[in-house]
Amino acid sequence: MVDDEELRLFHSLPRRLHHGEAACLAIARHRNWAFLTDDKLARTTGLALGITVSGTLGVLVQGVKRALVTVEAGDELLSEMIDRGYRSPHAGLQRFLESA
């Protein structure tokens, strides 16, 4: 159930945000949830609100870390996404696994 504080935050967020992103940010902030998005404005807004933010690469990396997929399978998924139009700043997951 949405409370008044969530609604106030939703209405105070930048109008450039999609309504769905703004709603998810308001909910994440007030319920102490993480927020997953690849949208730059939504990520920046979430971080400014103190929300844990991640995106597609973070989900893939967590899948590898939790042994849900191998690094090779994660890289293949990312490669297929890139082939289908996903714009990724990185072509593989290894560098994220090494820094963890």
Image (cartoon, rainbow, N blue to C red):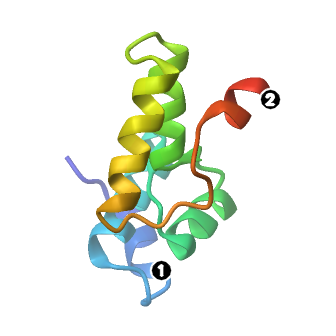
How many labels sit on residues?
2
- When asked about the image quadrant of residue 76, the answer is top left
Task: Identify the disc placed on residue 12.
Answer: 1
Residue 100 visible in the snapshot: no
Residue 55 visible in the snapshot: yes
Q: CA distance from mark 1 to mark 2?
A: 36 Å
Residue 75 x, y percent position in the rendering: 48, 36
- When asked about the image quadrant of residue 26, the answer is bottom left
The residue sitting at 45% across, 69% down in the picture is: 9
The residue sitting at 59% across, 69% down in the picture is: 45
CB-based contact (under 8 Å), mark 1 and mark 2: no
Residue annotated with mark 2: 99
The residue sitting at 42% across, 45% down in the picture is: 78
As drawn, 81 above or below 11: above
The residue sitting at 39% across, 64% down in the picture is: 86
- Residue positioned most to the right: 99
